[in-house]
């Protein structure tokens, strides 16, 4: 209750105003952009001066003012959609089918249709401003029999449809490229300078994207253009002028002037929307200074230690962590407040709250990594086992090797599809908001029924569903999945840890029937695995799961930076020694995370670099967050070891951690 | 005020400076033969490697002197580039002399300068003379030395040496392996620097990109694969001639004399933010202050910028005479020393932090630079005749404790009695800034100092590493007890017994003392 109130406070007082300011700037930038568009669209080399004077008279006309007002409305709408759809944690689809699910989500449908309509509006404004043959949808024409009718102006129609198409593809590409993801920059700059710096990129992006969109649109119109044409004619009671040859033909579409106007209109449309998006990103990621402590109790919920612990909204948590990282680095006076003791009582409440929150973030990531690694390692083990036994048995009996051959696609499939499901079933118990849904969303109605059929039984029948977390059990699972029932029945070793006992009983209870069912299921899966389309849809995208695992790692990066800088500063600034008490737990937390991260990077695809796509407005930083996290983690540990040096010998920690820390002290890691 | 007059006279030929102990510089004729008192006071420790790279040991790009034209322009160039080159040739008669020099220089040293001059020739925005001369001096300064660049690791005793054949060797006294780094894109290396707070990352400024190598210190491989290197490139940002890591290890800045923007890289994400300002026409080098708050970025024209790293705004500092030649920061980042081309003085700028509490405010800079040392030519009477020392300053280096300042004087390569020499000052930053003379550091006869760097974490004072034109790398330790605040991360007190205070009259003469107003 209290936290919702508070989130309302932040959204209402900060985010909304920032969004409003960004939209206001976008609206202010609209007239100059429109003027440039008018000049570019009507420019003729032969009469430059005449064109410019014509443009000026056009810009001051009533029609231009009206279309400008319409465009402002569109910008307001785009800004509102940005505010509504933005996220600080990208949603990463792990397979094609998950991506499809995202694209067909009702929320996304609303977004797409809104963009379609706005695209039509912008295209109409473009048509009016360009004028000439584009201006109206109908024009009087004389039929062969001499009677006059209103005929359809196909140039107008093609421009309107182009607007709709570009708007729609913009919205789809937004999903694919995670355009609604708002990233935070490591290099702080003033808003104006950042805007100025990104402007060339926006121009380039909108021009190239418009080019691709227009190319696709022309192809679509060539094949399907007759449908909307006929429909418009029917509804508006217009006629087709048979004397002019239609535009959905090769000759009609090879009109350079038409293509240029399509392209420049699409560029104008995308540019205005990208500018709005860019301004929104710049404004919303601006640093917000939270007070470390306040002398008024009614402002206590706005202070950094309180705000950090909030789960919702994410933007609040991210801005608070960013502020923590910056204050620990740059501001001695605010650090002093962090290290201070509470006035009556003398407790370091501020430091305790901050360090506890940072540690819980890091521990959460560690746990997630360990769980993921265990599931993947299971499948990796299965693969090596099967190939190993294949080599062994092939000399003995051809039958077994034959079955092994049949089984050969199995490990890859297991690697690809169910891993994510398991990860979810283990990790996302009480699904914390930080745990991004890095699996295809099975609960959503848009996950295909076949997917559910395929995965759900696995989830239920998998013996370690639910409670089990020990890697021991998980490593034994591939044996349960193998075809040979006897090895499973006889050869299962007695469970060593006590905690494993109950699932083990669970697995031994289902008798032959369960085994039979399981084998059936395997066979169905293998059957499906051979179908190309299914494989295509269900194949895990390489490194996507790795990206998804680290999707919110910006928070961890700031937590690491903040806490390590605070510890560094505590060496000389912490008068009461409040940091010293937490040092062992922080160090061990970091070392455990370091180990987990190191193990994760040994997995296939984890350390492969993503391709860099330069000309896209989508921010690709989420693809490299895991590398940033790894680098920051190492730097953070080194920062602590360099600061404290040999004093670290006095810190209590386990022998294993001490050994690991010693490597850092000697700069050998 | 001539500072050099108070210095002890340079050593005669054949003598080399070995170290500083008990407040004086000791010399010897052979590196092996060390004076007794040095050996007695010198702590027993692993002495750093002295290396020698003879020119003949490298397989260099074969270029003949005569066919410089062929070396100058590739035949694979487009028609446009060739015509632009022709235009340049016909319209720059005034620079013909420079050109000839460049040709010679070129044929000596191969690809990199070839590239620079070619780039200059066909540059989009035709370079003004200053940029050209900046490139030219850069090229001459590095021309005859086999060692291209040198970098100490900021925390350990290992160092990286970039050689003329574009390979980089990493020497570590604690390990037997010497990894050699080679990469397809690693051409014309101009600078190397280790990432702070990291054991393995080494940034290399190459012709078209910045490479960041990850050399595992525990690996036994002598040829790390090129998969260990990250490539950071940005269109239009070449040739990269200087790089600087932020002291916190999070960001890397790179600069090119052909690009007006300074790139600030987020290395893990391989993304960069260009910091663009109008004017200047390129950035000749970068120096990040040790506290991480400022970055010095001089341009090839008479203007340099000091970036503040909190919000990345910059201050413009126009120079009267020429471009800023080199600069260095005091360890606390509050003071910048710099030299200007064509002048023989060292200037100082003082930066004070913004009042505490205003976190977004930029630090308030000083109003004007103060002259702290005058290094104009001074003649010394030695046994072998007069030696003239002084003149223009090539580079500056300040040791990480702020107690020794090394100044590399250019000298005159043509005149025998005006050698390039390193003058070392004693400095004090607290409570007031002071400069005292220490002495000259000289190497073997006919060897001129080219590069110098202080060891970032030498425990017993300061250790100056000098790369000589002969291809030799030597280390000159300065043993002293630090008067400043205790150093972080050091184990206990220094091992040296306190040297008896032999206060010579020389050492007491202060050259410069800051006036507190």
Image (cartoon, grey):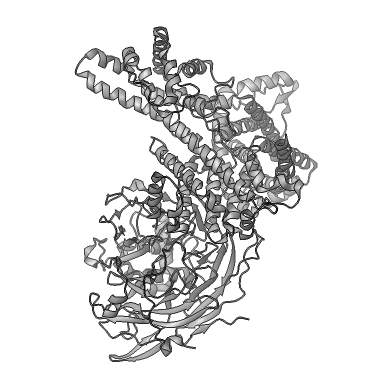
Instruction: Tell me if B464 is positioned left or right of A549 in this view.
Output: left
Instruction: Tell me if A285 is positioned left or right of A587 in this view.
Output: right
Q: Nearer the viewer, residue A201 or A397?
A: A397
Instruction: Tell me if B442 is positioned left or right of A252 in this view.
Output: left
Q: Position of residue A582 (x, y in %)?
A: 53, 49
Q: From this viewpoint, which residue is outermost toward the top?
A: A513
Q: Nearer the viewer, residue A1 or A265?
A: A1
Exactly how many numbered labels are in the figure? 0
Q: From this viewpoint, which residue is outermost toward the left?
A: A395
Q: Nearer the viewer, residue B238 or A550?
A: A550
Up/down of B69 relative to B322, above or below:
above
Q: Is residue A490 at least partly visible in the picture? A: yes
Give residue B111's quadrant in the image: bottom left
Q: Is residue A280 at least partly visible in the picture? A: no
Q: Position of residue B19 (x, y in %)?
A: 33, 77
Q: Position of residue B514 (x, y in %)?
A: 56, 81
Q: Position of residue B349 (x, y in %)?
A: 55, 74
Q: Quadrant of the N terminus of chain A?
A: top right
Up/down of B325 relative to A571, above or below:
below
Q: From this viewpoint, which residue is outermost toward the front?
A: A345
Q: Nearer the viewer, residue A230 or B497?
A: B497
């Amino acid at each position: 209750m209290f936290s919702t109130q508070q989130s309302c406070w932040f959204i209402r007082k900060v985010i909304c105003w920032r969004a409003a300011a960004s939209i206001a700037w976008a609206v202010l930038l609209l007239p100059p952009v429109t003027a440039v568009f008018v000049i570019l669209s009507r420019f003729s080399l032969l009469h430059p001066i005449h064109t410019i004077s014509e443009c000026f008279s056009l810009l001051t006309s009533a029609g231009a003012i009206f279309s400008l007002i319409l465009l402002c409305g569109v910008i307001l709408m785009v800004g509102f959609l940005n505010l509504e759809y933005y996220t600080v944690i990208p949603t990463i689809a792990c397979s094609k089918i998950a991506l499809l699910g995202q694209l067909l989500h009702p929320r996304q449908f609303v977004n797409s249709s809104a963009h379609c309509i706005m695209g039509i509006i912008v295209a109409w404004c473009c048509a009016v401003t360009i004028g000439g043959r584009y201006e109206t949808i109908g024009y009087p024409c004389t039929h062969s029999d001499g009677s006059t009718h209103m005929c359809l102006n196909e140039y107008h129609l093609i421009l309107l449809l182009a607007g709709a198409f570009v708007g729609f593809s913009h919205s789809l590409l937004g999903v694919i490229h995670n355009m609604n993801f708002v990233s935070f920059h490591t290099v702080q700059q003033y808003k104006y300078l950042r805007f100025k710096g990104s402007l060339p990129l926006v121009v380039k992006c909108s021009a190239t994207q418009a080019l691709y969109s227009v190319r696709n649109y022309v192809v679509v119109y060539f094949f399907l253009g007759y449908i909307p044409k006929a429909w418009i004619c029917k509804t508006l009671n217009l006629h087709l002028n048979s004397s002019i040859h239609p535009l959905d033909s090769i000759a009609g579409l090879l009109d350079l002037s038409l293509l240029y106007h399509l392209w420049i209109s699409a560029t104008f449309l995308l540019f205005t929307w990208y500018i709005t998006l860019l301004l929104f990103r710049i404004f919303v990621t601006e640093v917000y200074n939270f007070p470390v402590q306040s002398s008024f109790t009614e402002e206590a919920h706005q202070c950094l230690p309180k705000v950090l612990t909030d789960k919702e909204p994410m933007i609040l948590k991210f801005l608070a962590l960013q502020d923590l990282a910056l204050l620990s680095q740059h501001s001695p006076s605010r650090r002093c407040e962090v290290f201070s003791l509470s006035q009556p009582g003398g407790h370091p409440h501020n430091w305790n709250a901050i360090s506890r929150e940072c540690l819980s973030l890091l521990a959460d990531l560690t746990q997630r990594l360990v769980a993921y690694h265990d599931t993947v390692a299971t499948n990796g083990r299965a693969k090596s086992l099967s190939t190993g036994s294949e080599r062994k048995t092939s000399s003995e009996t051809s039958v077994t090797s034959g079955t092994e051959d049949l089984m050969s696609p199995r490990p890859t499939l297991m690697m690809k599809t169910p891993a994510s499901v398991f990860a979810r079933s283990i990790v996302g118990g009480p699904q914390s908001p930080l745990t991004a849904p890095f699996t295809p969303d099975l609960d959503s109605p848009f996950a295909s029924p076949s997917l559910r059929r395929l995965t759900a039984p696995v989830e239920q029948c998998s013996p370690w569903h639910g409670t089990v977390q020990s890697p021991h059990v998980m490593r034994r699972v591939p044996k349960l999945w193998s075809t040979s029932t006897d090895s499973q029945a006889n050869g299962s070793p007695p469970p060593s840890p006590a905690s494993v006992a109950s699932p083990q009983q669970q697995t031994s209870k289902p008798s032959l029937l369960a085994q039979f069912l399981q084998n059936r299921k395997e066979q169905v899966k293998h059957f499906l695995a051979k179908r190309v389309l299914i494989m295509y849809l269900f194949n895990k995208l390489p490194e996507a799961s790795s990206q998804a695992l680290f999707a919110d790692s910006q928070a961890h990066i700031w937590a690491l930076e903040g806490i390590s800088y605070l510890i560094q500063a505590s060496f000389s600034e912490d008068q009461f020694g409040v940091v010293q008490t937490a040092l062992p737990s922080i160090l061990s937390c970091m070392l455990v995370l370091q180990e987990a991260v190191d193990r994760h990077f040994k997995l296939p695809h984890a350390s492969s670099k993503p391709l860099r796509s330069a000309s896209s407005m989508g921010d690709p930083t989420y693809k490299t967050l895991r590398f940033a996290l790894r680098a920051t983690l190492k730097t953070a540990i080194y920062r602590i070891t360099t600061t404290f040096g040999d004093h670290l010998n006095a810190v209590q920690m386990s022998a294993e951690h001490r050994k690991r820390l010693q490597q850092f002290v000697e700069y050998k890691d | 005020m001539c500072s050099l007059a108070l210095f002890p006279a340079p050593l005669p030929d054949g003598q080399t400076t070995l170290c500083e102990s008990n407040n004086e510089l000791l010399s010897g004729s052979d590196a092996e033969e060390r004076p007794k008192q040095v050996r007695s006071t010198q702590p027993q420790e692993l002495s750093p490697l002295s290396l020698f790279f003879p020119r003949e040991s490298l397989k260099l790009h074969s270029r003949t002197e005569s066919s410089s034209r062929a070396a100058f322009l590739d035949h694979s160039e487009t028609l446009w580039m060739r015509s632009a080159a022709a235009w340049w040739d016909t319209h720059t008669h005034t620079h013909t002399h420079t050109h000839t020099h460049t040709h010679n220089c070129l044929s000596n040293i191969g690809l990199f300068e070839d590239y620079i001059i070619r780039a200059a020739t066909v540059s989009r925005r035709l370079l003004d003379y200053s940029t050209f001369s900046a490139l030219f001096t850069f090229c001459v300064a590095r021309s005859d030395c086999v060692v291209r660049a040198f970098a100490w690791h900021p925390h350990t005793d290992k160092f990286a040496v970039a050689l003329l054949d574009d390979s980089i060797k990493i020497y570590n006294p604690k390990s037997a392996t010497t990894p050699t780094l080679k990469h397809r894109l690693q051409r014309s290396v101009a600078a190397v620097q280790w990432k702070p707070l990291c054991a393995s990352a080494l940034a290399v400024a190459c012709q078209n990109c910045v490479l960041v190598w990850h050399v595992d210190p525990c690996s036994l491989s002598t040829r790390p694969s090129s998969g260990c290197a990250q490539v950071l490139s940005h269109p239009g940002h070449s040739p990269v001639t200087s790089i600087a890591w932020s002291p916190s290890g999070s960001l890397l800045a790179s600069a090119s004399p052909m690009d007006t923007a300074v790139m600030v890289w987020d290395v893990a994400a391989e993304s960069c933010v260009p910091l663009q300002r109008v004017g200047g026409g390129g950035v000749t080098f970068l120096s990040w202050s040790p506290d991480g708050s400022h970055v010095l970025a001089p341009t090839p024209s008479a203007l340099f910028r000091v970036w503040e790293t909190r919000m990345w705004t910059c201050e413009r500092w126009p120079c009267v005479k020429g471009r800023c030649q080199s600069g260095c920061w005091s360890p606390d980042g509050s003071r910048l020393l710099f030299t200007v081309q064509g002048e023989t003085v060292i200037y100082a700028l003082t930066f004070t932090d913004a009042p505490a509490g205003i976190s977004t405010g930029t630090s308030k800079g000083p109003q004007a630079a103060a002259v702290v040392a005058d290094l104009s030519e001074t003649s010394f009477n030695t046994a072998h005749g007069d030696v003239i020392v002084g003149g223009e300053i090539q580079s500056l280096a300040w040791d990480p404790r702020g107690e020794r300042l090394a100044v590399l004087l250019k000298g005159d390569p043509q005149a025998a009695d005006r050698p390039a020499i390193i003058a070392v000052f004693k400095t004090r930053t607290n409570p007031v800034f002071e400069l005292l003379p220490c002495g000259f550091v000289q190497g073997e006869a006919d060897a001129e100092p080219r590069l110098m760097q202080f060891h970032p974490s030498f425990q017993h004072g300061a250790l100056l590493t000098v790369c000589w034109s002969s291809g030799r790398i030597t280390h000159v330790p300065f043993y002293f007890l630090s008067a400043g605040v205790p150093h972080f991360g050091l184990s206990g007190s220094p091992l040296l017994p306190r040297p008896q205070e032999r206060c010579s009259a020389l050492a007491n003469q202060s050259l410069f003392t800051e006036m507190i107003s």
